[in-house]
Image: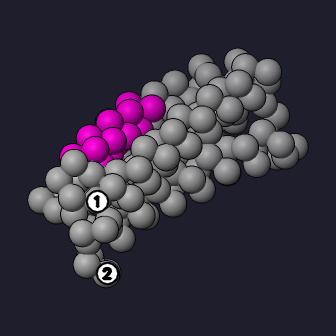
Amino acid sequence: MDGRGQELLRTVLRVDGWSTAVFGMVMLALAGPLSGPLGLPVTWAVPFGVAMLGGAAALGLIAGYPRIPARLAAMAVAGNGMSAVAMLALVASPLLPLTALGVAFMLVGALVVAVYAVLEFAGLRRARPLTAAGS
């Protein structure tokens, strides 16, 4: 992988991983108190928090490779893209009793993960021309 693309990708993966970990811990620690203001049931907030901690660990592992494998970087891009779409779908569906603040919370979350996806994709694209297939 190209050095500048590698470093952009590594930096974004690390920031994404740390922010995801912090957000996951907040969701776990404050699931109850945030439930009312957001309309996000604790039964949803806790699994979201656990999933975020798992995702954060995966992002940290990927960022720690001496040479980030393109397929793992692509998985991070896809994961963030799917997360953004899922949050938008939850806002649009009647599945959760989100308050106005909860809707804003989900929309901001969707925007943040979409930005991470775009930045990780940019790093991957910058680095990919020098990457062998399947690495």
Task: Mark yes or no: residue 59 visible.
Answer: no
Mark before the other along the chain sequence, 2 or 1: 1
Query: Alpha carbon of mark 2 to alpha carbon of mark 1: how far?
Result: 14 Å
Q: Identify the mark at residue 105; answer none if there is no mark.
A: none
Q: Nearer the viewer, residue 107 or 38?
A: 107
Q: Residue drawn 32% across and 36% down?
A: 15
Report the span colored magenta: 7-23
Where does residue 118 sit, x and y in percent of width and height? 49, 46
Task: Mark yes or no: residue 94 visible.
Answer: yes
In the image, is 18 to the left or to the right of 90?
left
The secondary element bearing badge 2 is classed as: loop
Q: Is residue 28 above or below residue 7?
A: above
Crowding at dot 1, Cα within 10 Å, few <14 / some 14-19 / many 20+, comes out as many
The residue labelled by disc 1 is 127
Q: Check disc 2 and give the amino acid type.
A: Gly
**Across the whole image, how many numbered discs are drawn on residues?**
2
